[in-house]
Each structure stands twice: as C-alpha cells, then as structure tokens.
Image: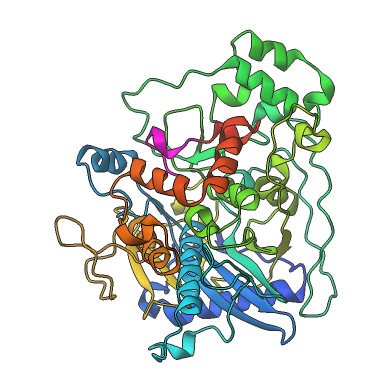
Amino acid sequence: MSSSTSGTFAVRHVEKRRISTCRFADRVAEMSVDRYRQLVPSEYRQAQQACLATFVAHEADSDRLWVIALGVGTKFLTEAVLESEQRDNSVYGTRVRDCHAEALARRALLRYLALEIETLVAPSDTEPSNAELQPPVRLLENCRALGTTNPLFRIRHGITLHMYTSSAPCGNAVLKKFATFQREVFRDLPPEQWPSEPHPPMPGHAIPFGQFALLVKHDATAAIGRPSLTIDPSTSASVLVESGTAPLDGKLETNRSASSGKGWPAQTTTDWCPPGTSTVWKQAGSIHTCSDKLLRWNLLGLQGSLMSSYLSAPVFATTLTVGRKLSNVCCRRAVCCRAVTKTSQRKPSNSPTFPKIHHPAILGTAVYLDETGIVDMASSRQAEGQDVRFHSTRCWVWCASGMTAVECLDGSTGFLWPEDTTDCQQRNKDGQRTTSLVCTLVLTELLVQLRGRTSSDALGTTKAVPQSLPDLLALKQRVSPRHEQTKQNLLSRHPLLRQWKQRGSRCTT
C-alpha cells in the first residue's frame, strides 16, 4: 500500500465513503474499532489493512454496549499443512485452521460463554487482572437449578447479541452479479434501536449459475495432481427443483442439462466466483467461506455442539453490521435467505425437518476501520474493484474473560507467534509454538472440565479430552445428541447445505 498521493498513478481510499443504516450500527462499529485499537499494538495497526470482527452485547434497560469477543485476520491453513497434520497423526485441534476475523471472533465467543458458565457454576472471589476490559454485566443466567442432570443457561432477558465485521464476509456476500446494488438509506431511529423489517423472499432466478452456491477459500496449490470431484447430476437436479423459487422463470433447459450429466454452468467453471474463492465441486480448497459459516450459524446457532448441552436455546446475533463492500441484498442472501427452500415453506408430510432460519438485521455503517489508507491502483496489480490487500499473516483474537491480553496467531500455521507471551501452556511437539486459547483442543478441554464439575455422568469422572477427530465427534454425539442429529440432518438432506464439505473428508467446518 502506498501512503503517497503524488505522481501520475491513480489512487483510491482503502474504504469507500458510505452511508450508515442507523445510529445503532455506528455505535456498534465505533465500540468495535475502539476495542481493536485498544488491544492490538499500534505498530501492527499502522499502514496495514485488516479485517476485524466482533460480538457486542447490548442491554436494553441501560442501553449499554460492550465488546465480548474480537478477531482480526484474513488467513487460513493450506491443504499442504492440513495433510501434513493428518500424516503426522498430530493431536486434533491444536491448530486454528481458519484465522479469518469472523471465525476467530466466534471462537472467542465460545470461550467467553464457557468461562461465564464456569463462573455461574462456581463463583470465584479472585479479582480479574484485566478488570478494565471486563463486561459490565453478565450475558447468561441460570434457568435450571444446580443438582439436576445438567444446569442450563440462557441469554438474560433484555440482552441481545450483535455481530460486526469491517468488511462483507468472504464468499457469497460479495457475489454481486445476481442482484442490483442499492445504496443504504439512513433510518432516523433512536440510538438504541435498529430496523426490524422481515427479509423479503429471495428469488432463485440464477441458481444454476451460482447464485446460492456454497464456496470454499481457494488454495492455489490444492488442485495440483488431484482429480476433479465427480458431479452427481441427480443431486444437482434435485437442488434445482427444491431451492427457493423456480430458477430461470421456470425454464427447464438447465434441469435437462443437469440430468444428462453435463452439470450446471456454476459447476463447470470458477470464473464467476469472487476473488480468493472456489466451488465445493473442485479440489481447490476445503475450508468454507465466512458467508457459508454465517449461514450455518444462523441455522444451528453460534454455540456449537458441545456448548449446546448447557444452553436452553441456540444463540444468535440479532444484527450484523458490515463496513466495506456491503450490498444489503447480497448479504441477506448469503447469511440466511438462500437457506429458505420450497420444502421448508410448504412442509409436506414426508419432508425432512430443518431448523428455522434466523434472519439477522443487516446494517451498514459509516465508521471506517482505516481512515488514512491509500491504494496505488497502478502498482497494486489487483483485480478491478478489489480495493483491499491483506499481506500479514499476523492474526489477533481476544475475549472479555479469561484472557489477560490479546493473542497473536500466525495464520499460516494456526499456532501462536513464538514470541507471544500469553498464559497458554499447551505446546505442540516441537515446543516452539504455543497453541491458542481458542483452538479446538483447548476449548474442548475447557468444556470437558466444566462438564466434570456440573454433571454426574461418566464423562465427569474420566475427564478425557479427545485426541483425534473421531473421538471428538463421538464426544459430541454423546453430550449433544439432539444438536448433532439436527446438524447431520441439515448437512445430509438440506438441498443447499448437503453440499457442505465435512471434516470427515479432510475438511473443516
């Protein structure tokens, strides 16, 4: 990135000028950006573009906002790293496989929820070392008395959860060829309110061309030497029939093409995909984009499988505030509306039961993460319209409980930077990098220990932390059978989500 505006080359601001949806969206963004600047050292914030995501809680009675989880990053592990981990029989979950901001923020939220439950179960008199960063009130409350099979918790009445991301989630949310862009319109609402209109139906007029498609993060080396995936024409045709409204105004030419084995246009090329992404039908990556992950979270909840055994209901973000590259209609399509199908609407007697989709309010903000950045368009060699470049592999994660400082991760390895001095003592086999407090292994260990203190079942006495993926999946099935059944039903039978690349096939979720 060039900081100079001199010379004959064209330059542009890193963040385009834009209009906010309402004052509440700007408040969420301002608090998130302020916490980012407070936590991440200034030497890593200067002249460096970044993507920030947070979860912010709001208490209606006091109109207080506070950040409870934060992630900064744009990197993910390559297929080569994932394969080496599998070959070496490493302990599963020591690496953070996806260090995109949204994925890190969600992991930080899981840690926050686990530690708050731990505090509610066994209150401590110890004063937190970072008291100035602690939340003013608790997010959860106990809704089942201790001493029963398991205590259950829920979000306190009057508290809502809100997500912020400084840029539109990668993947379907930035796929703008199938919708007409409309500028945000400012709503003159009180500062504690946000728009709550229902999302209108999403017309599936271009499904064969990738309008609703799931996408993975493209790994340039992943497809070398590997055969392409075989496309199942029957699956393609069934998705066409079941999804949304009749595509292409009811014309069946594409359906006949699929049934004859030629496949859809979206399956035969990746030219239509947003930069840095690929289709699930190509061997060019396995980690799903953030748009897909938000879609899944709006179906199953943010809490995940193990945490769901402690909660009386799934946890959802009420709003999603987006900075750069927001197209409201595209974002709605990406994070929720593309999962609505004819099957789920008419509910015939023989149809599968899917969880009800949660539709967050999509908000834009005029608050900028980078106020001064300038891009030299002549020397950047970037795709037209792609006005942000991410070079550093340093990623950051923090939650408002149980972390004395923000963690710095190496997005290319999934481990902490070697010089990081956090209090995490878990180490990989070479002893040179520590594992993050939000990696799968540490989060699972925390939840297993917590269950040992709140449950009388055998798991509480063994306190065994899964060392492999099959063991982890077995633990989830045992602890949260209902959540696991709902998830498997979704990933095997839903006309769109059944394309998801699951971890059992060397892929992450």
Residue 483 vs residue 289, the one in the foreground: 483
Q: Main secondary structure of the magenta part?
A: loop
Q: Residue at x 84, y 75 (%)?
A: 189
Residue at the farthest left position: 430
Magenta residue check for 334: no
Q: Residue at x 68, y 35 (%)?
A: 211
Residue 489 vs residue 327, the one in the foreground: 489
Q: Quarter of the image for the N terminus: give it.
A: bottom left
Magenta residue check for 507: yes
Q: How is the image coloured?
A: rainbow
Residue 108 vs residue 326, the one in the foreground: 108
Q: Residue at x 45, y 78 (%)?
A: 401
Q: Quadrant of residue 494?
A: top right
Q: Which residues are magenta?
A: 501-508
Above/below status of 52 relative to 291: below
Residue at the farthest top position: 260
**Side of 389 relative to 343 (left or right):** left
Q: Position of residue 118 (x, y in %)?
A: 45, 74
Q: Position of residue 41 (x, y in %)?
A: 38, 79
Q: Residue at x 23, y 46 (%)?
A: 90
Can you see residue 357?
A: yes
Q: Position of residue 458 (x, y in %)?
A: 37, 55
Q: Quadrant of residue 390?
A: bottom left
Above/below status of 13 relative to 96: below
Please state the total of marks drawn on the protein image.
0
**Side of 211 relative to 52 (left or right):** right
Can you see residue 49?
A: no
